[in-house]
Every structure is written in structure tokens, then in C-alpha cells.
Amino acid sequence: MPTRKVYLLRHTRGFTLIEVVITVAILGILVSAVLPLAEVTVQRTRELELRRALRTLRIAIDEYKDDFDLAVKNKKIIPEADQTGYPISLEVLVQGTDWDGLYAFPRKYLRRVPVDPFDDGQGWGLRGYRDAPDSTSWDGKDIYDVYSKSDRTALDGTAYSSW
């Protein structure tokens, strides 16, 4: 006669309510500690983007001015009496200029105008060559410098508009 194996069923227990509550509480504490760090990381990343955008724009403006000076030196263009050599708009840096034959093609200084990551629909703040270094109004004649119009404060305590 075949032998029968008898298996004893073991009753497994689930988690008690106390165990579940403690686990959820620990997870809640961990999440509340991580979220502020994530927010700081996002802000730091946006600050890096702003620094890069400002550097890119300022380098393009300076290169435009250098080419203007070179075109004047090589007698390719004759500047007007009040002309500073700085671009009249940011779009000029994207469209390019051939400087009346200094280059065989219009030299472009930017592929596109970078976006201010802290922009609230205000766009870049512009300063002309004749404007004061901390001016918030633009004379509209040329672009000597750019700045963020954001009224927010950076992680280091400085205003983004002062960068």
C-alpha cells in the first residue's frame, strides 16, 4: 500500500496594523527629508543654465564688437559718428552680418537666443553702451550687456538680475 505524506499547513501571518503604520511613518520621514534636497538641486541646475546663457550672450556681443572693429580697421565699413559697434538687437547675432565683404558669408554669432530659465515672460534685460552699469532701462541704440529680469534671489543670496 502506498504511503501517504501528510503535510501540515502552516498558517502564515500578515503584517500587523502597527507594522504597516511604522513603515509608512518611516517612509514619510525619508520623503520629507529628500524633497527639499531635490528642490535645491533643481534650482542649482537652473542657476547653472542662467550663467551659461549670460556667458554665451556676452561672448557673442563681444565677438560682434570685435568684428565691427576689424571691419572698420580694414576699411570695409565706415562707422557713423555715434555708432559704438555693438549689435542693435539680439536677433542680429542670430541672423549674422557679412561686414561688407569682411567675410564671404554672413557671420552668425548665435544659433538661437538662449532663454532665461528664471524668465517670467519678461525676456532679457538689455543695457546699452551709454547706460549705467546697473541700469534697468535700455536706451534702445545698441546692446552692450544683458541681464536677467527675474526678481528672485539665488542660493548664494544675490539677485539674479545682478549677475
Image (cartoon, rainbow, N blue to C red):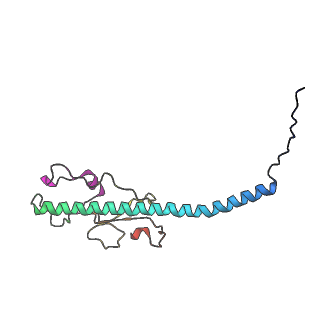
Q: Residue at x 19, y 65 (%)?
A: 83
Specify whether 42 is left or right of 127.
Answer: right
Quarter in which the C terminus is drawn = bottom left
Query: Does residue 141 appear in the picture of this structure?
Result: no
Of residues 6 and 115, the one drawn nearer to the viewer in this rendering: 6
User: In the displayed image of the protein, which residue is found farthest to the left?
Assistant: 75
Of residues 122 and 52, the one drawn nearer to the viewer in this rendering: 52
- Examine the image and state in which quarter residue 39 appears: bottom right
Q: Residue at x 60, y 62 (%)?
A: 34
- Does 13 appear in magenta? no
- Does 104 appear in magenta? yes
Of residues 2 and 74, the one drawn nearer to the viewer in this rendering: 2
- Dominant secondary structure of the magenta stretch? loop
User: In the displayed image of the protein, which residue is found farthest to the right?
Assistant: 1
Specify whether 16 is left or right of 114.
Answer: right
**Count of number-bearing discs:** 0
- Picture coordinates of residue 53 (x, y %)? 37, 60
Q: Residue at x 44, y 59 (%)?
A: 117
Quarter in which the N terminus is drawn = top right
- Picture coordinates of residue 79 (x, y %)? 14, 62
User: In the displayed image of the protein, which residue is found farthest to the front?
Assistant: 1
Specify whether 4 is left or right of 66.
Answer: right
- Picture coordinates of residue 128 (x, y %)? 28, 67
First to last magenta residue range: 85-109
Query: Does residue 31 appear in the picture of this structure?
Result: yes
